Image: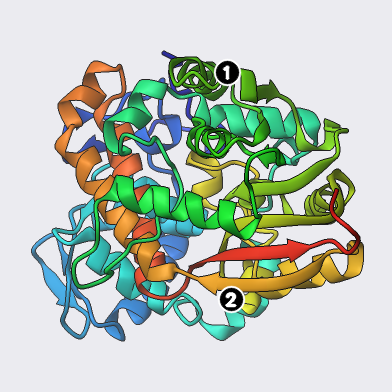
Amino acid sequence: MSTVHPPTAGTALPGPRTPAPNASAGQVDAARWPDVAIPPRVSRARRALAAAVVGRALDRLPLRVRYAGTRTAGLGGPLVEIHRPDAFHDRIGAHGLIGFGESYMAGEWDAPDLVGALTVLAAHAGDLIPAPLQRLRRLWAPRHPAAMRNTPDGARSNISSHYDLSNDLFALFLDETLSYSSAVFLGFPARPESLAAAQHRKIDRLLDLAEVRAGTRLLEIGTGWGELALRAAARGADVTTLTLSAEQRELALARAHEAGLADRIRVELRDYREERGTYDAVVSVEMIEAVGAEFWPVYFRTLDARLAPGGRAALQAITMPHERMEAARDTHTWIHKYVFPGGIIPSTDAIEATVRDHTALRPARRDAYGPHYAETLRLWREAFTARAAEVDALGFDATFRRLWTFYLAYSEAGFRAGYLDVQQYLFTKEGTAR
């Protein structure tokens, strides 16, 4: 198992500081989680400003916020309990939304219905911060660290930091297909099918869009743990699939051998920019989010270059509203620091403009499935919570569990609020297929 190594970045004022107690498990390990264990020191004026801005926002939201049993705020709704108001405001005053997430990791606040509370916040993401501060965002919001740029070396490091945590960890909360992307449910929302069946439905739909059949030369960008490659090979396709995760590659190869399909599947530890083959179809599932905005033109030019005339590219992509993407694209966030370094979620406008301006590909179809992702994340989150003891047994501590609980709930809330969506795209290339 690869052990998680959380970032140690972040500067602090000199002087003694007191580690923050984790509400669920004693003390935070300061060696493993330095920016969580010890709250930042800020001036009283900065704390007061943070408290005023946060209080103004919360007072106008359908939440019920309780401050250490002393007072309440909000218009009523999901409960948020702030156990240590000073530390909570210090973190937000020093690090904004990164501090908000770190405060949860430290156990300084909680919510019995975490998804419900975060859904309210996600639904008001555009107006939580006063307009004057929004206009000055470039001055106060942290910028992406240069080390997280998705250059070929940077992309390898970014992908490894998440996907090489442990195959066993992901197997605890994913279904048996080991699919780590939105499912597409039949019968949703009334009586949805099982998660595994819905993951197969998602994969089969993408393969159908790309017209993958016996003899198809298929390139997959972003292997995951190999389920799409397996289903494509079972159709008789010849599959080349690319990943930057050594652990994912190892398991995907083992699964191909176990299924008797190793002769039809090549799993390459290779950056998409390094591929030189020509293919009838390209499929890429929720990989564009890890590309980085500056490399979107390269990514789509690669799809164009790898497709033979008459070829088809099917993509699944998480998206967000264009104006929110533009506001956040240069900002270093809690998700970047602890979950997906170097990532940025595109808008549909950004995807379609990049394809138009940098390729000869033609958009042929787009379908949205945002509520299906909320349901997928709910099932992952509940499975992760139910198997907490097994997560511990793998060597991940209580702070890591709070981190991942927050990440899964935060993501689910984004889709429930409509702040996030997920699309399946089909792009075609003119010419005559072989």
Residue under numbered circle 1: 262
Q: Is residue 121 visible?
A: yes
Residue 221 is situated, as x and y percent measured from the top left of the image, at 68, 40
On the rendered image, what quadrant is the N terminus found in?
A: top left
Amino acid carrying label 2: it is Pro
Decide: few, some or many residues near mark 1? Use Cα within 10 Å; few <14, some 14-19, many ≥20: some
Amino acid carrying label 1: it is Ala
Which residue is found at the position 84% from the left and 61% from the top? 429
Residue 401 is situated, as x and y percent measured from the top left of the image, at 28, 35
Q: Which one is earlier in the sequence, the residue at label 1 or at label 2?
A: 1
Helix, strand, or loop for circle 2?
loop
Quarter of the rendering containing residue 365: bottom right
Q: Is residue 51 visible?
A: no
Residue 390 is situated, as x and y percent measured from the top left of the image, at 20, 23
Decide: few, some or many residues near mark 2? Use Cα within 10 Å; few <14, some 14-19, many ≥20: some
307 lies left or right of 312: right
Which residue is found at the position 71% from the left and 34% from the top? 155
Residue 152 is situated, as x and y percent measured from the top left of the image, at 79, 32
85 lies left or right of 155: left
Figure check: 41 above or below 81: above
Helix, strand, or loop for circle 1?
helix
Q: CA distance from mark 1 to mark 2?
A: 41 Å
404 lies left or right of 248: left
Figure check: 178 above or below 326: above
Front position among marks 1 and 2: 1
Quarter of the rendering containing residue 213: top right
Who is closer to the viewer here, 10 or 345? 345
Residue under numbered circle 2: 321
Residue 415: mark: none
Which residue is found at the position 41% from the left and 59% from the top? 44
Which residue is found at the position 18% from the left and 54% from the top? 83
